Image (spheres, helix red, strand yellow):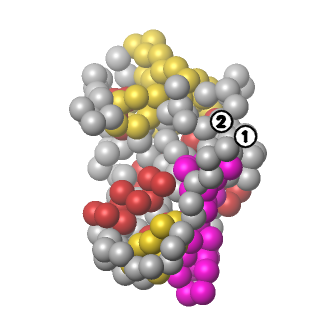
């Protein structure tokens, strides 16, 4: 069995398990994750913006050619040019092993749409609605052949959304964020499953 090392984070330093500081990559990842979404929030560095991808999964991810690939979405249908119907991947869970629901996706969309970081990306997506079958229908303001690429916003567990300082919403990414001695530590998410 291969074990993933813990990733230790202190303001200004990154280290894999050894706790030895290496290249200065970020200023304060813990605070970034706590303020990932919501009005007026934005990552203070490009590296921090990328590191938040370790904590949260999304419906789609962009590959190296910037082509959207399914992640939490098992399938995306487009019944007409202004609607996307997203079917969630069977067995998709958050870090606490609770199921990712269509309601979590809609809540995450609403938070992301209001945020400084994702608002522009989602400007053509007018709304998201969960249905009884557990799918999410996104309504576009105008047809967009690249709309799948807009579904890269983080999916957060709805019941963990908070405005409390120092609290980060729960995600389903590769790592879980834990506060440690005034800094933070990324611990491998035992429930993470690589899409595909």
The residue drawn where x is 36% and y is 43% is 122
Residue at 28% in and 63% down: 46
In this view, the residue farthest toward the bottom is 182
Which numbered circle lies on residue 133?
Answer: none
Going 62% across and 71% down the picture, which residue do you hit?
178
Q: Residue furthest left?
A: 65
Q: Return the residue found at the far top.
A: 79
Element type where label 1 sits in the image: loop
Q: Position of residue 187 (x, y in %)?
A: 61, 62
Residue at 68 percent across and 49 percent down: it is: 190
Tag 1–tag 2 contact (CB < 8 Å): yes
Q: Quadrant of residue 74?
A: top right
Instruction: Name the side, left or right, on which 173 lies relative to 118.
Output: right
Q: Residue furthest front?
A: 1
Q: Is residue 156 visible?
A: no
**Quarter assignment of residue 50:** bottom left
Decide: is 182 above or below 2.
Answer: below
* Segment colored magenta: 164-190
- Asked if residue 184 lies in the magenta stretch, the reply is yes
| Residue 44 drawn at (x, y percent) | 32, 72
The spot of residue 92 in percent (x, y) is 65, 36
What residue did someone put label 1 on? 99
120 drawn magenta: no
Label for residue 92?
2
- Disc on the earlier residue, 1 or 2: 2
Of the pair 61 and 1, the residue shown nearer to us: 1
* SS at badge 2: loop
Q: Position of residue 70 (x, y in %)?
A: 46, 28
Instruction: Please give left or right for residue 115 compared with residue 101 in the image.
Output: left
- Tag 2: Cα neighbours inside 10 Å, few (<14), some, or many (≥20)? many
- Find the distance from the CA under tag 1 to the CA under tag 2: 6 Å
């Amino acid at each position: 069995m291969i074990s993933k090392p813990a990733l230790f984070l202190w303001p200004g330093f990154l280290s894999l398990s050894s706790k030895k500081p290496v290249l200065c990559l970020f200023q304060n990842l813990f605070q970034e994750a706590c303020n990932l979404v919501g009005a007026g929030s934005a990552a203070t560095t490009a590296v921090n913006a990328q590191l938040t991808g370790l904590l949260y999964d999304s419906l789609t991810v962009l590959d190296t050619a910037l082509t959207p690939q399914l992640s939490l979405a098992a399938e995306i249908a487009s019944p007409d040019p202004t609607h996307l119907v997203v079917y969630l991947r069977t067995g998709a869970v958050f870090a606490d092993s609770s199921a990712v629901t269509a309601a979590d996706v809609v809540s995450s969309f609403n938070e992301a749409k209001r945020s400084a970081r994702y608002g522009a990306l989602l400007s053509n997506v007018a709304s998201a609605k969960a249905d009884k079958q557990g799918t999410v229908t996104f309504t576009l303001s105008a047809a967009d052949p690249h709309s799948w690429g807009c579904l890269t916003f983080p999916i957060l567990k709805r019941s963990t959304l908070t405005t409390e300082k120092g609290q980060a919403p729960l995600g389903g990414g590769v790592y879980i964020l834990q506060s440690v001695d005034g800094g933070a530590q990324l611990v491998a998410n035992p429930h993470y499953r690589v899409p595909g």
